Image (cartoon, rainbow, N blue to C red):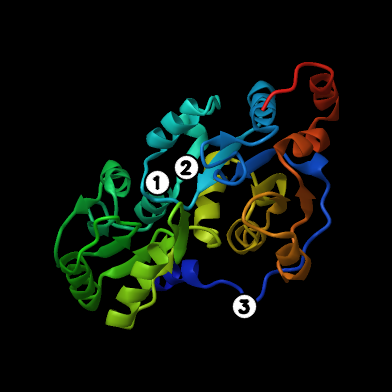
Amino acid sequence: MAEREAALVAKRAPPAPPPARTRLIEEIRGFILDMDGVLYRGNTVREGTLDFIHHLNAAGLPYLCLTNNASRTSAMYEEKLGRLGLPIKGEHVMGAAQATAEWLRARAVAGARVLPLGEAGLREELSKVGFTLVEQPPADYVVVGIDFELTYERLKQATLAIRGNAQFVGTNPDRTFPSEEGLLPGNGAALAYLEAATGVAPIIIGKPSVAIMEVALAHLGLPAEQVAMVGDRLDTDILGGQHAGLMTILVRGGVTSEAELATSPIQPDLVVDDLGALLARVAPERQANLANSTPSK
């Protein structure tokens, strides 16, 4: 019972975002970076990203690229970043699949049974940390990530497992995701289906939950007050960073419009145009040298 009550904390978010704090970027010793919208947009690396990553690597500053996407493993993301020309090793990358697996491993008994709904990346991360994957009840956990081949049969088995007292865990709450065809159903849509069928609300691991931030901070080895969350979404990146006590930095040009930024109760500590502009705040001398050389993207 105590374990279940402790786990439920992960899905409880404060009713309102905490107020923005005035912090000095000079106090920051590490960074958590959202990926799509911050490092790149689609398959295009954003202005200043390469210079910023080079600075982090050269200075030996701890950083972690963190995404709510649970369809890939960290190794898969390292490969994608490499194709984009970004020198980011797998140790600096974490998706919601890995974060969910690590968060559960710290709380579950060895060999616990997990019924997963999700892509190969989620299944691989869960297996890697020692969970026994099952396709039907009984199960100790039902873990739901985006599944592009989701069927009624899989939803049925997950429903029966949750009704059989399996803990219900969602890798992220995103109800939709953008595509060339328009907005498509995201992981939150499947979570809503199962919640309606079971009457049980899921434990959410991904942003804006504190859970994924706790896992990220453990990887960085830094206290929250020395870390900045850099993202392009107010309701996930910035809110999640605030809940965890991090400095928050919004990068313009992602999903947050100027109108949303002006009216939202969720306000970051700092707003920059891109990672090049952030580099100018973090390391002005390096940025000045770069400005006098051939610019890079």
Q: Check disc 1 and give the amino acid type.
A: Gln
Residue matched to label 1: 98
Number of numbered discs present? Answer: 3
**On the image, numbered disc 2 is attached to which residue?**
94
Alpha carbon separation for disc pair 1 and 2: 6 Å
Q: Horizontal and vertical percent for residue 277?
A: 78, 38
Let me know if residue 205 appears in the view. Answer: no
Residue at the location (71% across, 53% down)?
248
- Confirm or deny contact between disc 1 and disc 2 (CB under 8 A): yes
Q: Earlier in the sequence, mark 2 or mark 3?
A: 3
The kind of secondary structure element at disc 3 is loop
For mark 3, what is the residue? 15
Q: Position of residue 56 (x, y in %)?
A: 66, 29
Which numbered disc covers residue 144?
A: none
Q: Nearer the viewer, residue 7 or 255?
A: 255
In front of the other: 211 or 172: 172
Q: Is residue 115 left or right of residue 181?
A: left
